[in-house]
């Protein structure tokens, strides 16, 4: 018993440093992971930049790393160039931050867990001889794609993947995915994308990889990673099911819940295209007409201000907010479908509430997630080509009114139950978290 108590005391004092990339879709799951580890007895320090801070969580310590590259440059540089530059310029300030933390009394750092895109952290962890673990906020399949592409490129086997002739071909060794499904579009040139892949998906000296996914969603990708990576893989998601942390960077407009309360069960299409999507005004107008013609009520998250014509169309059957409490919306009984850009968090949140989807991916891994939603889990439909009102109307009806949509909802509900089971005691995600904790305690 005495030994147990000493052990508990030791665990209580152990600190984990988390290093998220400061954008919504990455901060939220990182903080949720921190909450999970906090309940297992670890002290949590979140090291983050000067903007987009979430710093009001009980039991968490927050440290500001002076910004080496303003986040605003993500728009001017594009995501890949931004990341490459960020990683080149951030090491020194993170090193200072860890050095200061180590100077403080009692600070025994058990591990640095960093977002896979913040790969400069690896050198810092190594310098201080602190174990490190990578955290992936995207799907396991996205990681498989990155690894396979890097390998094909290194072996000089990579063909011209932008050639329209090869788009429908299945990529060698890649889970029946075709070149057109790969998460490469909108990421700048292929060479620069591959440069990032080489850094992100080359495991270097990290001791493991945590993925916000569940084995019931991506078992073949996870088996592939478990075999190929040579370090333990911890699929312990979806983290949002077990965490109550609200990490919204924008103020949530809760008035939409009152509006939802007045709608029929499963009648509403919820439209949320992520924190970064921007749409052309012509597309917005076509969407508005299509939604109006579908005759279903709709809740639309739209950051841009709307032209008067659109506001008029919308005011009859729709409700607009600038930022919604998304998890609450998806859990609401009035919501029957989710029109999404298919970011990985939105995908997990939708499945976890049993809500089928209309997929309208913009870039990168969103396309891959859409492919899984439509063809692997068969819990949604893809809206391809130009947005025009007839197509929008048909897609909404297929999802909310037709038999086809009922089938998708049924399959989503089955997955919902599997996800819930995976995070319950004895489930695969529950066990993966336990394995991670065991590892952290032995370090
Ligand atoms: N989100 C939200 N309110 C909104 C729109 C989005 O709370 O009105 C949240 C959503 O629940 C998700 C995150 O923002 O957790 C978006 O992450 P995702 O990976 O889906 O997309 P990203 O913004 O990273 O492209």
Image (cartoon, rainbow, N blue to C red):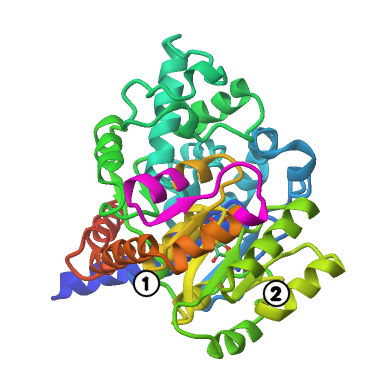
Q: Which residues are magenta?
A: 370-390
Report x, y in % for residue 78: 72, 38
Q: Image quadrant of residue 347?
A: bottom left
Tell me the distance, in whole angstroms, between the alpha carbons under discs 1 and 2: 29 Å
Report x, y in % for residue 379: 37, 57
Report x, y in % for residue 161: 52, 20
Give the crowd class for mark 1: few <14, some 14-19, many >=20 residues within 10 Å. some
Q: Vertically, is 344 above or below 246? A: above
Query: Residue sitting at 45 percent across and 77 percent down?
Result: 266
Which residue is labeled 2 in the image? 320
* Image quadrant, ligand 1: bottom right
Q: Image quadrant of residue 331?
A: bottom left
In front of the other: 107 or 230? 230
Query: Residue sitting at 56 percent across and 47 percent down?
Result: 361
In front of the other: 231 or 192? 192
Q: Image quadrant of residue 315?
A: bottom right
């Amino acid at each position: 018993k005495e030994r147990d108590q000493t052990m508990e005391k030791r665990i209580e004092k152990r600190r984990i440093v988390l290093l998220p990339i400061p954008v919504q879709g990455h901060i939220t799951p990182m903080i949720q992971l921190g909450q999970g580890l906090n309940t297992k007895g670890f002290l949590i320090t979140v090291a983050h930049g000067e903007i987009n801070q979430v710093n009001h969580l009980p039991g968490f310590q927050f440290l500001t790393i002076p910004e080496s590259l303003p986040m605003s440059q993500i728009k001017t540089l594009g995501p890949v160039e931004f990341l490459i530059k960020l990683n080149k310029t951030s090491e020194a300030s993170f090193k200072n931050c860890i050095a200061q933390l180590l100077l403080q009394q009692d600070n025994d750092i058990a591990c640095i867990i960093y977002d896979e895109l913040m790969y400069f952290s690896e050198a810092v962890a190594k310098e201080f001889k602190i174990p490190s673990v990578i955290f992936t906020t995207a799907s396991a399949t996205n990681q498989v794609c990155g690894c396979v592409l890097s390998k094909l490129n290194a072996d000089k086997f990579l063909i011209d993947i932008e050639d329209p002739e090869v788009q429908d071909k299945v990529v060698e060794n890649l889970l029946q995915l075709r070149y057109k499904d790969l998460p490469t579009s909108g990421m700048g040139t292929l060479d620069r994308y591959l440069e990032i892949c080489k850094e992100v998906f080359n495991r270097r000296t990290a001791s493991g990889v945590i993925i916000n996914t569940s084995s019931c969603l991506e078992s073949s990708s996870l088996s592939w990673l478990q075999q190929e990576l040579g370090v333990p893989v911890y699929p312990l998601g979806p983290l949002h099911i077990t965490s109550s942390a609200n990490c919204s960077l924008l103020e949530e407009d809760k008035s939409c819940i009152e509006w939802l309360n007045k709608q029929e069960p499963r009648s509403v299409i919820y439209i949320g295209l992520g924190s970064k999507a921007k749409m052309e005004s012509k597309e917005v107008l076509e969407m508005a007409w299509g939604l109006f013609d579908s005759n279903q009520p709709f809740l639309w998250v739209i950051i841009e201000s709307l032209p008067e014509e659109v506001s008029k169309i919308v005011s009859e059957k729709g409700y607009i907010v600038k930022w919604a409490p998304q998890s609450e919306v998806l859990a609401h009984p009035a919501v029957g479908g989710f029109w999404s850009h298919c970011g990985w968090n939105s995908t997990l949140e939708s499945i976890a509430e049993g809500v089928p989807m209309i997929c309208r991916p913009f870039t990168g891994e969103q396309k891959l997630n859409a492919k899984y939603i439509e063809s692997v889990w068969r819990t949604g439909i893809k809206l391809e080509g130009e947005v025009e009102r007839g197509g929008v109307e048909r897609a909404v009806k297929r999802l909310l009114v037709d038999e086809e949509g009922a089938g998708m909802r049924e399959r989503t509900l089955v997955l919902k139950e599997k996800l819930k089971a995976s995070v319950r005691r004895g489930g695969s995600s529950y066990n993966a978290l336990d394995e991670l904790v065991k590892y952290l305690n032995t370090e």
